[in-house]
Structure formats: C-alpha cells, structure tokens
Amino acid sequence: MWTDEDRKRHSQSGVGFPSNLTDEQWQRLEGLIPAAKPGGRPRKTDMRAAMDALFYLLRTGCPWRYLPGAPFPPRSTVYNIFRQFQREGVWELGRNC
C-alpha cells in the first residue's frame, strides 16, 4: 500500500517529462558516469540532461530523430554519449557495481 511519504518520494511530477530523473536518482547515477577525458576540451554537455534524454528514448521507444530538442542536448550529442558509454562498457552489468 502506498503511503503519502512513498508518493512524495517517488513523485515524478513537476517540470520536464515523467522519465526525467529525480534528484535522488541522479545522485546515485552521477557517480557511475565517467569523467571527461583529461587533456581535451572541457565537457560542456549537461550530463543529467543527456541521461534524461536517454531515459526518455528508452521509455517512449521513439526514434532518435524524434527526441525533443528543447529540454535535451542535441540528439547527435546524446547519441555520441550513448555510443561512447556502450563502447567503453559503462552499460555492462556488474562493471560499476
């Protein structure tokens, strides 16, 4: 049975999409995201927005080209982050656990 406390903690209401990460979820995920590589240009992409975009794509099942542009980074940026993480094994179970 859901209590009022449970509803408040798991509420996804507010600005953005229902698939967006809550602050608590982002705090847990943030430490698993690899840092920008040293020696290059500083990372300008908001990684939380990029992760929100990935979760939006997963939740809706929409094609990459239908990713809304307003709250998310450009779809090519999100795709490149996804592919980089995939190549480096960031998404493999047990690697970061």
Image (spheres, rainbow, N blue to C red):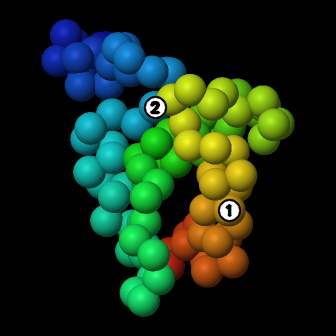
**In front of the other: label 1 or label 2?**
1
Q: Circle 1 sits on which residue?
A: 80
Three-letter amino acid code of the residue under disc 1: Asn
Three-letter amino acid code of the residue under disc 2: Asn
Q: Quadrant of residue 75?
A: top right
Graded by Cα atoms within 10 Å as few (under 14), some (14 to 19) or many (20 or more), the crowding at tag 1 reads few
SS class of the residue under badge 2? loop
- From what the image shows, is residue 31 above or below residue 2? below
Is 55 situated left or right of 8 in this image? right
The answer to whether residue 66 shows anywhere in this view is yes
Q: Circle 2 sits on which residue?
A: 20
- Return the residue found at the far front: 41
- Return the residue found at the far top: 4
Q: Nearer the viewer, residue 89 or 47?
A: 47
What x and y, as percent, mark residue 56?
61, 34
What x and y, as percent, mark residue 2?
29, 14
Q: Nearer the viewer, residue 73 or 41?
A: 41
What x and y, as percent, mark residue 76?
71, 52
- Return the residue found at the far left: 5
> Which residue does the image show at 33% across and 58% down from the upper left?
30
Q: CA distance from mark 1 to mark 2?
A: 20 Å
- From what the image shows, is residue 44 above or below residue 10? below
> Which residue does the image show at 50% across and 48% down from the upper left?
51
Q: Nearer the viewer, residue 51 or 25?
A: 51
Q: Quadrant of residue 58?
A: top right
> Which residue does the image show at 56% across and 43% down from the upper left?
73
- From what the image shows, is residue 3 above or below residue 48? above
The answer to whether residue 59 shows anywhere in this view is no
What x and y, as percent, mark residue 47?
43, 53
The quadrant of the picture occupied by the N terminus is top left
Q: Are marks 1 and 2 in contact (CB under 8 Å)?
A: no
